[in-house]
Image (cartoon, grey):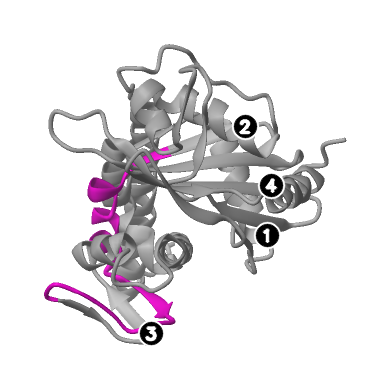
Amino acid sequence: MQKRTKPKMKTWKKVVLFLMAFLITGAACYGAFTYFSFQKAVEKMQAQEHPNNNEAIISDKLPHIDPFSVLLLGIDEREYDVGRSDTMIVVTVNPEQKTVKMLSIPRDARVEIIGNNTVEKINHAYARGGIPMSIATVENILNIPIDYYVAINMEGFLQIIDVLGGVTVNNDLDLSHRQYSFPKGEVTLDGEEALIFTRIRYEDPRGDFGRQLRQKQLIQAIAEKAASPSTLFKLNDIFDVLGDNVQMNFPMNNLYQLQKLYANLNKDIDQLQFEKGDGQRIDTLWYYIFDEQELIDISSSLQQHLEIE
């Protein structure tokens, strides 16, 4: 009796199966490489040290459960100079309420620099004692704990905008600086333009407050663009930029929790701002002097958001 032979698989089915196997293998390899790249970048961000950072800053907060605060420091680093915190933003997050508050601190605010026993501009705290002294000084004026920090070398960090293919912000005022022009309305920025956009100060009638507004807009625009699916194949380049230009104290497991938390947060951030203080010249230097009642009110608002009794 003659044996029946199995019909051969059609060529197109073989091709489809081969392609599927190739894509799955490629995706697995890319995923493993991306994870390794991410882990390497995080280790680098946690390992970087400022010359004055002589103590570890560790928080036991669980970002997906506990309300927490973050101090964002935008560092203006120059050659032969330890740098100053050109930008200081406090962010508080309440996971249960799914809400975020963001407060910009004027760089020229006259405060006591905790640990240095001086009264001077708050952006000098970083130059005097690095991240620990910046945190201690902010904690003292706002009367809240700072759980986490992210310190960014702004000039290098904004390379990430070029990796993302530019970001778009809604500019509320016609602005220009040297050869750069930023018309009112939606403006798409590359990295170099974004750096100028966030540094404009004297050309804006609102001075430092206008600059703070633009900085917060840019942070939000970067976060939104980075969270979009289109960045999937740019992750390794993004991690390279972060590893070279960011310092932070978020542990690896907290970063995964933050990723899940971000998807559930209300993206309508409550923007807080100091508006009632006065400018004053003291010993030839110009300072921003807080309005005491406004400072108390803002401190109280942040305490409530962090559920501090």
- Image height check: is 259 above or below 111? below
Q: Which comes sooner in the sequence, label 2 or label 1?
A: 2
Q: CA distance from mark 1 to mark 3?
A: 24 Å
Q: Amino acid at mark 1?
A: Leu
Q: Residues within 10 Å of mark 4 (few under 14, many from 20)?
A: few
In the rendered image, residue 216, in percent from the top left (x then y), is placed at 47, 61
Mark 2 is surrounded, within 10 Å at the Cα level, by few (under 14), some (14 to 19) or many (20 or more) other residues, namely: some
Relative placement, left or right, of 46 versus 254 is: left
The residue singled out by tag 3 in the image is 186
Q: Does 226 sit above or below residue 44? A: below
Asked if residue 134 can be seen in this view, the reply is yes
Point 50% across, 29% down: residue? 249
Judge depth for marks 2 and 1 and give the one in front. 2
Residue 85's x, y, as percent?
37, 40
Question: Which one is closest to the eye, mark 2 or mark 4?
Answer: 4
Q: Is residue 161 magenta?
A: yes
Residue bearing mark 1 = 265
Magenta segment boundaries in residue numbering: 151-179
Q: Nearer the viewer, residue 4 or 297?
A: 297
Which numbered dot is residue 292?
A: 4
Q: Which residue is mark 2?
A: 139
Kindly identify the residue that appears in the image at 74 percent across and 46 percent down. 296
The three-letter code of the residue at mark 3 reads Glu
Query: Residue 17's x, y, as percent?
Result: 37, 64
On-image quarter of the C terminus: top right
Ranked by sequence position, the earlier of labels 2 and 3 is 2
Q: Mark 2 or mark 4, which has the lower sequence index?
A: 2
Q: Which quarter of the figure has residue 143?
A: top right
Q: Which mark is residue 59?
A: none
Marks 2 and 3 sit apart, C-alpha to C-alpha, by 36 Å
